[in-house]
């Protein structure tokens, strides 16, 4: 027997079946969300995930994020990779490069493996790993479209995880979360004030993101 | 000898001497700030600190915040106070009233003591107490001007502490933080992205806060 649902029920069914999207504005808040059942998007705009996207776009063979300088040095030696990372905004002692995207043009990074450690982004990535995330991807403005296309296609629950600055909420990671949300909001059930805050911030600043971040930024850059 | 500083040095000196203001968007982030050296403004717009301001405005003798239902009942019996509090948005079992400001008109609350416990606001208040805050005050839209006047007059460091919802950042507490910041920004050194986010949110929503919160709110109200 063919059962035809009225249109409004079909609409409700469609709503119920949407995957959820949450935003964690700091690694100190990640435990509040069901990481194990979600795709986690690690966001560290200044600058780990911007660098990862740029290095891969410029032909890096792979990028391996590690959580300590010593592990970075050890792995770099083993696989003859480029070791890079910063602590408190400076190249960490014992490593070769920093985490600015501008350090990784094609003629330098193509075909090489980058072993990267940073204060905030890599740490959050390992937290998501430990909590058994369904999938972990990294996001920043250089790969915004790729992130949005992927999470829409996967149809799974998503957590936008801002790396923040030593657990303090920051503007640029929240703005990227907002940029994602503004593009995918129809495909997800978004019942989360942090997401609404991030989207509202992005809508306010999107005409000139650089000026917006510069006007509102904190002293750590 | 009279020493005259150039104007720019006087300006720098003035900047250095301003007290600092930080915003903690969740109780789970409060440990990142120097509570012991600050006035902490507890913000729980829906609804503990709105109720506290309303009850005091309507002549309550005092309001005593406590951190558990059992303590609320015990103290209520001892001092013959009004016991009130909610858990998950409902009047807690064993207590008499909820935490809506509308439950405390002058003809009911005048001259009485209100013993109040709530899920989020009271908990944050006790966290600030334990960390040895210099002073603790409560803030919400009904006492916005009083809060701003007081922190300007005191000339001390300030932490705007959002009670949030079970540690998840919420819109209405962030908006109140933004409302305070928009009024006191010239008197404080505000080097904190959470504060900039809160202020930007408020500037975006201030023309119609009710509609803004309703449009962006989460499901817990």
Image (cartoon, coloured by chain):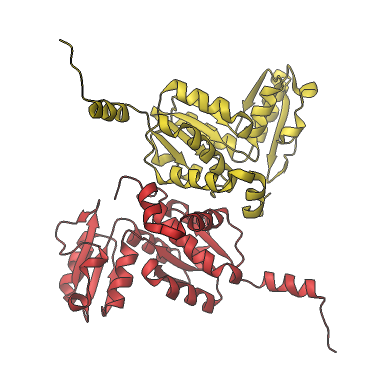
Chain colours: A yellow, B red
Q: Is residue B31 above or below residue A123?
A: below
In the rendered image, residue A171, in percent from the top left (x then y), is placed at 57, 48
Name which quarter of the figure residue A218 lies in. bottom right
Residue B214: percent from the left, percent from the top? 35, 51
Judge from the rendering whether residue A80 lies leftward or rightward of residue B215; answer left or right.
Answer: right
Residue occupying image coordinates x 67% and y 49%: A211
Write the residue at 44% across / 45% down: A196
For residue A189, what is the image quadrant?
top left
Q: Is residue B130 left or right of residue A54?
A: left
Q: Residue furthest top?
A: A1
Q: Tell me the residue at 42%/40% (across/down).
A: A31
Taking depth in this image into account, of A213 and B20 the one nearest to the observer is A213
Q: Hey, which residue is sitting farthest front in the picture?
A: A7
Q: In the image, residue A120 lies at what x, y percent? A: 59, 40
- Indicate whether B29 appears above or below B137: above
Q: Nearer the viewer, residue A58 or A180?
A: A180
**Residue reaching furthest to the bottom:** B1
For this rendering, which residue is in front, A38 or A207? A207
Whether residue B52 sits left or right of residue A27 in the image: it is left
């Amino acid at each position: 027997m063919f059962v035809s649902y009225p249109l409004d029920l079909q609409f409700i069914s469609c709503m119920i079946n949407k995957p959820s999207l949450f935003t964690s504005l700091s690694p100190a808040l990640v435990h509040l969300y069901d990481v194990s059942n979600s795709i986690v998007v690690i966001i560290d705009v200044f600058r780990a995930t911007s660098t990862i996207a740029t290095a891969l776009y410029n032909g890096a063979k792979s990028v391996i994020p590690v959580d300590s300088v010593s592990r970075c040095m050890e792995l770099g030696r083993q696989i003859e990779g480029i070791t890079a990372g910063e602590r408190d905004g400076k190249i960490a002692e014992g490593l070769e490069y920093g985490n600015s995207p501008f350090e990784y043009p094609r003629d330098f990074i193509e075909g090489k493996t980058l072993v990267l450690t940073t204060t905030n982004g890599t740490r959050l990535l390992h937290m998501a790993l430990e909590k058994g995330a369904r999938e972990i991807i990294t996001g920043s403005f250089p790969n915004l479209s790729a992130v949005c296309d992927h999470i829409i296609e996967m149809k799974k629950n998503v957590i936008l995880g801002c790396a923040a600055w030593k657990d303090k909420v920051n503007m640029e990671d929240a703005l990227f979360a907002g940029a994602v949300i503004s593009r995918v909001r129809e495909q997800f059930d978004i019942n989360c004030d942090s997401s609404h805050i991030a989207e509202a911030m992005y809508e306010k600043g999107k005409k000139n993101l650089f000026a917006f971040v510069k006007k509102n930024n904190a002293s750590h850059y």
